[in-house]
Amino acid sequence: MKVSERTIKFLGKTLCGDNKILPYKTGPQLVDFFVEFGADDRYEEGFPSRWKYTEEKVRQFNGTQGLKLIIENSVDPRDLIEAGADPEELDAIIKPINDYLRYEGFELKKVGEFYKVHDSKGIVVEPETVKGLNHEFIQEQITKCHTKIDQGDFNGAITNARSLAEAVMIEIIEQHEGKEIKNDGKLDNLYKQVKKILNLTIDPHVLPPTVIQILSGLDSITSGLSGLSNNSGDRHANKFKTLKHHARLAVNATMTFVDFLLDSKEYQNIKNGNNN
């Protein structure tokens, strides 16, 4: 889901409650809110203005299905009612948000008790999945990342790379468990689960030191990608400016990482006589 810069600015002030459309959120509440969708932030000294932080988070997730989930969760009827909204007036609260979303080809509509994002044809916008996970899918996503780099959108490329790593690991876990999992937004936690599933535990009695050294590097990739996707935002510009070679490093490291996970998954499937 992708929206224009004008709508990004509107959502920035709306989601934090500054324009009084949605309930007011404090800095810590905003951090907790976005962490649910994969942000890796902390509320600490030097935290930017609430609206500026929120706007940057919307910009970071723009062009991903994370933005859809953020918008839908921000208008959870339970939260609105707890904040004092009249249950009969929820549609009126949604209206000014829809006034902006319609220009982007989207609209919030009630489905059951909740509001879901629909496209201009009235179809519910569903999150993209990685069903049928394969090398071709991974290469396609990496190509999109490199396109963003060529266009000068270094932060966007890093965000997409992180989203790809997250999506691939979630798919591996869900295929293994046979059900949808709750993602806490922490790449490190996802990789811990994937290592167990794919039997990537480092055993010095089986693997040579050189292979162990490389496998250990995969832990660094997940930690580094998580931190870089967070620190490349504008609010950190005074500390770190994302450059083209940083973005390429993140994207290429992600490609190596997810490609290895897919190879390991295929190896385990063959070894166990599993065709999934």
Image: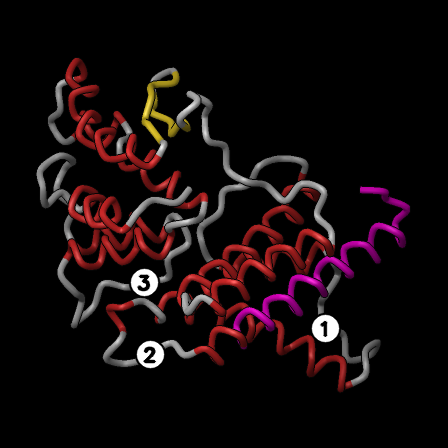
Tell me the CA gap for discs 2 and 1.
Answer: 35 Å
Q: Quadrant of the C terminus?
A: top right
For the point 19% across and 29% down, the residue is: 80
Tell me the CA gap for discs 3 and 1.
Answer: 30 Å
Mark 2 surroundings: few (<14), some (14-19) or many (≥20) residues within 10 A = some
Mark 2 highlights which residue?
Answer: 241
Residue 223 to residue 22: above or below:
below
Residue 112: give x, y in percent of width and height: 38, 15
Residue 172: give x, y in percent of width and height: 67, 49
Q: Nearer the viewer, mark 3 or mark 2?
A: 2
> What segment is highlighted magenta in the picture?
249-276
Magenta stretch: dominant SS?
A: helix
For the point 18% across and 66% down, the residue is: 47
Quick one: SS at disc 2?
loop
Quick one: SS at disc 1?
loop
Residue 166 sits inside the magenta stretch: no
For the point 39% across and 45% down, the residue is: 2
